[in-house]
Image: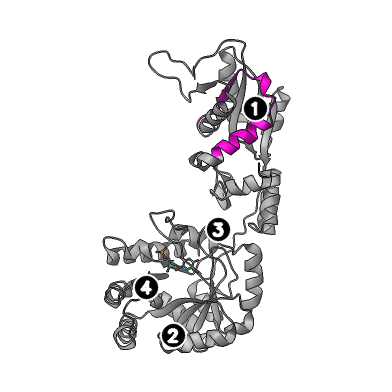
Amino acid sequence: MESKKEFFLECYKLGIIKFGRFTLKSGIESPFYVDLRPLASDPKILKKLANYLLEMLPLDNFDIICGVPYAALPMATAMSLESYIPLIIKRKEAKSYGTKKLIEGIFAKGQNCLLVEDVITSGKSILETIEEVENEGIIVSDIVVVLDRQQGGREKLEAKGYKVHSLFKISEVVKILREMHYIDEDEVARIRDFVNGNQVVFEEKKRLSYEEKLEIAEHSFAKKILEIAIEKRSNLIASADFVTTKELLAFADIAGPHIVALKTHVDILNDFDEDETILPLKNLAQKHNFLLMEDRKFADIGNTQALQFSYGTFEISNWADLVTSHVIGGSKSLDCFVNVGVVAILGMSSQGALTDSHYREEALKVIENHPNVIGCVAQNEISDQLLLFTPGVHLGKKGDDKGQQYHAPEHVIRNYGTDFIIVGRGIYKSDDPELEALRYKTEGWKAYLSCL
Ligand code: 5BU
């Protein structure tokens, strides 16, 4: 079998732990959120998980297995299938009719039962289950949990004489994720504080208003986009990923009144033509007062980027107000982008993107103080000096089948301090793109105002 660390990372990719700021059921704010239910949706992982859990246990001791409802039910079932130890089911509430039994299945008094739980925090829900199982005359000696949040649950159960086995502890998990640069030092410190029972201080950093950002902005296109935002009361950039000029222009005309910029991928157009595509697009940009942002994602040496920027079919330098660029070629590779605002790509929204915190820290050093850079594309907070553009925004969906990951406008604006949300299919694939553009504009602006 792979190492426990590799297995954890496989599980982590299913989105079982999220970092940020979460309000728990108790009202307490937590720097992380755990939900192991996705593990049950991947049969291979669930099977492996069952075997990892079984490996830790003195299996001869157990006559039956029982999961704490609901999250641990599939885990307990999988363990039963892998070990041939029979399963019993504990209901959350007793049936109001029929047998009114709380424990279902075949069991006998005096049998020893292994309890399975997904996460142990205070131990409260496990103790409730233990009590109900023991009321049936069943003996509980061992509890196996997938993740120990290390918040006193284990100690509480051990003080009552139960043995607790855990596959992962939050401290181990945090160490692995830090090593992998999935989380930064601040997050590690906040989690440590939280786990130690100290109140976690989430910096109540007030975000700067667009007016305040305008005062410190130096680049002409940074000023321009901020001025448009203030004037139109919008922080929405529509991504117009069309393959025909006709669709692109029709969309630009209806979304135009609601957006600060239209983001294009002109290389996906079947019929790109400077006169037919760019001239009318520029007219629409003028008519509705928005900028043109070409999402070219340059990623080469300076000389090649200079050629790609000004030559070829698209002659981007002739018409784009903003361009996106990777910074993998180093700071000097960005020198060629004159008379345009560079939006540097620090973090990508897609699943498994290699832009981890180490990459982002290094990328930030590349763009720091570069006069051509007005901001970044990222999925996390950045400095006030830079404008933050966040794609991967959708009001209804969590992602697509090609790895895109979505968050709501409110989430990115509140948690990352996003200045401009970038929305593609959420608008142009909707039944009424004009109405939807207005909805995203309204949502984005409302979220911004609520963070001031
Ligand atoms: P969507 O339809 O809202 O998923 O489109 C998002 C757009 O933003 C699309 O044009 C992408 O190329 C672009 N994008 C992104 O989604 N995520 C990123 O990290 C970067 C760009 Br960089």
- Return the residue at label 1: 143
Q: Separation of disc 2 and disc 4 at Cα?
A: 21 Å
Asked if the magenta segment contains residue 452, the reply would be: no
Determine crowd level at label 2: few under 14, some 14-19, many 20+ residues with C-alpha closer than 10 A.
many
Q: Which residue is mark 4?
A: 259
* Range drawn in magenta: 46-69
Indicate which disc, 3 or 1, sits on the residue closer to the N terminus: 1
Residue picked out by circle 3: 352
Estimate how packed mark 4 is, as few (under 14), some (14 to 19) or many (20 or more) residues with alpha carbons within 10 Å: many
Above or below 452: residue 19: above
**Which residue is at the front of the view, 234 or 425?**
425
- Mark 2: which amino acid? Ile
Q: Residue at x 42, y 13 (%)?
A: 99
The answer to whether the residue bearing label 2 lies less than 8 angstroms from the nearest atom of ligand 1 is no
Question: Which amino acid, by three-letter code, is at mark 1?
Answer: Ile
- Residues at discs 3 and 1 in contact (Cβ within 8 Å): no
Q: Quadrant of residue 402?
A: bottom left
Mark whose residue sits in front, 1 or 2: 2
Q: Is residue 392 above or below residue 138?
A: below
Q: Earlier in the sequence, mark 2 or mark 4?
A: 4
The residue beneath circle 2 is: 316
445 and 63: which one is in front?
63
- In the image: residue 164, left or right of residue 66: right
Residue 172 image point, x, y percent:
70, 46
Quadrant of the rendered image holding ligand 1: bottom left
Residue 327: x and y in percent read 59, 76
Q: Amino acid at mark 3?
A: Gly
Q: Which mark is residue 74?
A: none
Disc 4 residue type (three-letter) = Ile
**Quadrant location of residue 302?**
bottom right
Determine the secondary structure under disc 3.
Answer: loop
